[in-house]
Image (spheres, helix red, strand yellow):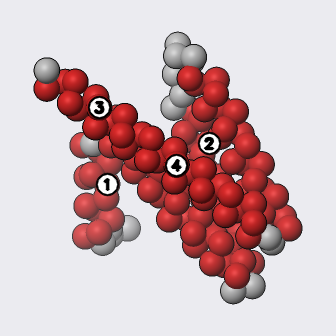
Amino acid sequence: MLKSPNQMYQQTQAQTASKPKLLIMLYDGAVRFLRAGIEGIQESDYQKANNYLCKTQAIIHELISALNFDYSISEELLAIYEYLLHLLIKSNIEKNIIPAQEALEHLMELREAWVEASKMQATMGDL
């Protein structure tokens, strides 16, 4: 199967990105898919909503699998990720955007926290 230039670019980005950059890319994908899922619910296009909400869930499962439980924050992140999964499932079953919007807010806050942590790590690496 031939890949588009965009797909090849994204694959190269993922293969060459640092761990913090990969994490932020996962959050970007989750946010993008969740917004599309919310849009699907708003349009009463429930197949679209289900597709994108499930893609968001898959990314959250990937974030869970990437947790390193040598660090205490991983337990807290696991609880947050499980709550996000709960919100996404509820939104998908009920075709209600309110739980999905709450999940979106949390994902955006987490993404921003990782961006800031990445900047701090880069700054400390320069010392």
Residue appearing at x 20%, y 30% in the figure: 123
Q: Is residue 22 toward the left or the right of residue 56 in the image? A: left
Q: For label 3, count other residues whose C-alpha is less than 10 Å away and answer few (under 14), some (14-19) or many (20+).
A: few
- Name the image quarter holding residue 45: bottom right
Q: CA distance from mark 3 to mark 4?
A: 17 Å
Residue appearing at x 33%, y 65% in the figure: 7
> Mark 1 or mark 4: which is in front?
4
Q: In the image, what residue type sits under mark 1?
A: Gln
- Name the image quarter holding residue 53: bottom right
> Mark 2 or mark 1: which is in front?
2
Q: In the image, what residue type sits under mark 4?
A: Glu
- Name the image quarter holding residue 64: top right
Q: Residue 11, labelled with which disc?
A: 1
In the picture shown, does residue 123 fall above or below 32?
A: above
Q: Position of residue 54 (x, y in %)?
A: 67, 59
Judge whether residue 45 can be spotted in this image. Answer: no
Of the two numbered discs 2 and 4 on the same chain, state the one appearing first in sequence. 2
Of the two numbered discs 1 and 3 on the same chain, state the one appearing first in sequence. 1
Q: Which residue is mark 2?
A: 61
Q: Which residue is mark 3?
A: 120
Q: Which residue is mark 4?
A: 109
Q: For label 2, count other residues whose C-alpha is less than 10 Å away and answer few (under 14), some (14-19) or many (20+).
A: some
Residue appearing at x 37%, y 34% in the figure: 117
> Mark 2 or mark 3: which is in front?
3
